[in-house]
Image (cartoon, helix red, strand yellow):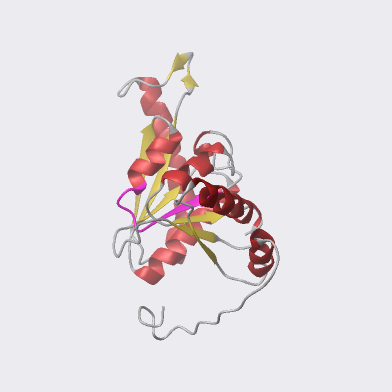
Amino acid sequence: MAERAPGVPVTAYRSSGRAARILLDASERARTVVLGSARGGNLERILLGATSTSVVALARCPVVVVGPVLPEDGDIVVAFDDSPHSRAALRYAAATAERLRVPVRVVSGWFLEVVDGVVATTPGSPQYEKVKRRLHGSIDAALEPVIAAHPDVAFTAVVKQGKIVDIVLAEAQDARLLVLGTRGRGGIAGMLFGSVSRKVLQSARVPVAVLSHGA
């Protein structure tokens, strides 16, 4: 660490007890908790996976889970569903992007949605375009105060139809960081720390920052 970041002071200490409890206690006074993802053998995945799940769900600060790839470039991707927690994730992404001097890509989407009695899954159909316009409008509204606070950061919006996990992972594959806000409202939605967030954390190859309800 001293070689990669010579100007950053580092303190190491040992503590006894459950790893998750120790890290959760540390999150009370930390700005960020950083974890390595569990990608080893079965036992290692079970132990580290349980720790990561508890810390991500209950930490009082943002948690960054680092996988096998640590990109040196790329933008920051943030999953957005217009919930208060995804708006917090958007603010976090913008502040981080400002420090790193990189752009932010805001990703939203839907899987199945009925508009005027029709399932909006056909590209170019009035129902499909209506859902896209609504989601783009939500992103634009959420971005107004964020752009005002971070005028030097460039933002783009991506809205797609499909499985939420697939959309997020596809957009994040070339990102420097993926940001998720937990406790979402259905759809992209599922950024409730549940199946969607777990699948993203298990599959993402880039670092993932998660803002839980307490962060």
Quarter placement of the N terminus: bottom left
Q: Is residue 44 above or below residue 185?
A: below
Q: Tell me if 181 is positioned left or right of 163 in this view.
A: right
Q: Tell me if 123 is positioned left or right of 116 in this view.
A: left
- Magenta residues (range): 172-181
User: What's the residue at 63%, 65% (across, down)?
Assistant: 23
Residue placed most toward the observer, 195 or 87: 195
Measuring from the top left, give residue 198's x and y in whole percent: 53, 43
Is 118 contained in the magenta span? no
Q: Residue furthest top?
A: 117
Quarter placement of the C terminus: bottom right
Measuring from the top left, give residue 127's x and y in whole percent: 40, 21
User: What's the residue at 38%, 38% (across, down)?
Assistant: 167
Q: Is residue 23 above or below residue 115?
A: below
Measuring from the top left, give residue 75's x and y in whole percent: 33, 57
Q: State whether residue 113 appears in this view.
A: yes
Residue placed most toward the observer, 60 or 6: 6
Count of marks overlaid on the render: 0
Measuring from the top left, give residue 31's x and y in whole percent: 57, 70
User: What's the residue at 40%, 71% (across, down)?
Assistant: 99
Residue placed most toward the observer, 82 or 6: 6
User: What's the residue at 69%, 70% (across, down)?
Assistant: 16
Q: Is residue 129 above or below residue 26?
A: above
Residue placed most toward the observer, 64 or 121: 64
Q: Tell me if 170 is positioned left or right of 185 in this view.
A: left
In the figure, residue 4 lies in which quadrant?
bottom left
Q: State whether residue 145 appears in this view.
A: no
